[in-house]
Amino acid sequence: MEKVSRIRSKSSPIERLAHKHAELKTQVAQLAGQRFLTAAEDRQVHALKRARLAAKDALRGLLRADKH
């Protein structure tokens, strides 16, 4: 993600998405680190993973657009 750190200082949307992705990753790790998950927690993990993937896809799209 060196590319992200170089571009991050230039673009606010990229920085926001990178921060959101990092927050979601932390939340997923915290929940997934539990020994057992309730059904609600399991659904929350899946929702967080989907949101994290969406943020990552959006970030890649912005990086690709910034490259051109």
Image (spheres, rainbow, N blue to C red):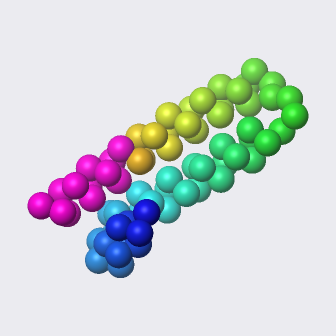
Residue 44 shown left or right of residue 20 in the figure: right
Residue found farthest to the front: 2
Magenta run includes residue 58 = yes
The count of marks equals 0
Residue 15 visible, this angle: no
In which quarter of the view is residue 11 placed? bottom left
Give the residue at the far right of this rendering.
35
The residue depicted at 50 percent of the width and 43 percent of the height is 52
Image location (x, y in percent) of residue 7: 31, 72
Quick check: 2 left or right of 34? left
Would you place residue 48 above or below residue 61 in this image? Answer: above
What residue lies at 66% left-to-right and 43% top-to-bottom?
28
Residue 13, image x and y in percent?
33, 63
The magenta stretch spans residue 66: yes
Q: Please give the range of residues in magenta.
A: 57-68
Residue 42 in the figure: left or right of residue 52? right
Instruction: Farthest residue to the bottom: give it.
Output: 9
- Percent x, y of residue 14: 34, 63
Coordinates of residue 38 in the picture (x, y in percent): 81, 25
Q: Is residue 18 visible?
A: yes
Dominant SS of magenta comes to helix
Q: Nearer the viewer, residue 24 or 1?
A: 1
Quadrant of the snapshot with the C terminus: bottom left
Name the residue located 71 percent from the left edge and 27 percent from the top edge: 42
Which residue is rendered at x = 42% and y = 47% of the image?
A: 55
Q: Quadrant of the N terminus?
A: bottom left
Q: Residue furthest top?
A: 39
**On the rendered structure, is 60 left or right of 23?**
left
